[in-house]
Image: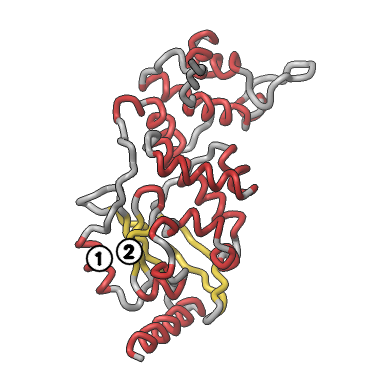
Amino acid sequence: MAPTTPPPNTLGDFLKARRASLSPAAVGLPEIDGARRVDGLRREEVALLASISTDYYTRIEQGRRRASAPVLNVLAVALRLTDEERAHLHELAGREETGSGGGRASQTAQPQLRRILDGLTTLPALVMGRRMDILAWNPLGAALLSDFSRLPEGRRNYAWLMFRDPAMRALHQDFENIGAVCVAMLRREAGIRPEDQRLADLVAELRGTDEDFDRWWGEHKVASDNGGSKRLRHAVVGDLTLDWDALTCAHDPTQRLVVWTAEPGTPSHDRLATLASLTADAMVG
């Protein structure tokens, strides 16, 4: 009988990555003379900061001991976690209770979100589901980003396009920042849905084909998908600086309506209006 492969220790990997990113000086600990065998903090230093025993912390990191919510909170403080990273830590630690299903079933956009898309004629928008799958879009969203209708359904995924479609990568002027945030958002989702095989397959493909994705994935950083800004270089209307906001669907929290806007009175606002006019004319023609 072949040996059983042990399950991935995602919580331990996250803890190790976060302590590796901190120096003793950054958390107020004295530097100890002599070469350090590990990057960043040692396990005993994390335990000291969290006021728990080294053995207890080691067992948590190795996946041999479950941590209570209060212990996770003190670890979050010790490791200087952001609010998003703190939430991710709790998600990883509680994954056995919450469950997530196999994740193979395809989603369809909620009817309410589709009606909103139909009513948005001057703003680019799309509906994003689990795994950053693109479930629906309006004509201006396609004109801004990509003609999603020409893609096979399995390739209508924002992360896949960012790292596998040269046109999408070239569209983003600040790809180094946006690409890293995209990976951090996907990492957050992987913590929420560790049993999602389609998500695992997507990550495996991108790690195996893109060095940037693989590097950023290994950093174990997480980010929310509530909003931000992007600098785009559009082939038709030129440079755009746009804000994006993601609105969670009340009927299905795994679906979000993502909308791009530009500040009124700016060149980006005028260029976005031009793109909307060109898109409307093309639909009529």
- Indicate the colouring scheme: secondary structure
90 vs 206, nearest the viewer: 206
Residue 280 relative to residue 17: left or right: left
Say the numbered circle drawn on residue 136. 2
Mark 1 and mark 2: span between their CA atoms?
A: 7 Å
Residue 263 relative to residue 240: left or right: left
Residue at (42, 35) in percent of width and height: 191
Looking at the image, is 138 positioned above or below residue 218?
below
Q: Name the secondary structure under disc 1.
A: helix
Who comes first in sequence, dot 1 or dot 2? 1
Tell me which amino acid carries mark 2.
Ala
Q: Position of residue 98 (x, y in %)?
A: 29, 30
Residue at (37, 20) in percent of width and height: 70
210 vs 92, nearest the viewer: 210
Residue at (49, 24) in percent of width and height: 9
Q: Position of residue 150 (x, y in %)?
A: 43, 70
Residue 28 relative to residue 71: left or right: right
Q: Residue 94's image quarter?
A: top left
Residue at (59, 37) in percent of width and height: 218
Instruction: Name the residue furthest right.
Output: 34
Tell me which amino acid carries mark 1.
Arg
Q: Quadrant of the C terminus?
A: bottom left
Q: Residues within 10 Å of mark 2 (few under 14, many from 20)?
A: many
Say the numbered circle drawn on residue 264. none
Instruction: Name the residue furthest bottom.
Output: 285
Say the numbered circle drawn on residue 114. 1
Do the CB atoms of the residues marked 1 and 2 lie less than 8 Å apart? Answer: yes
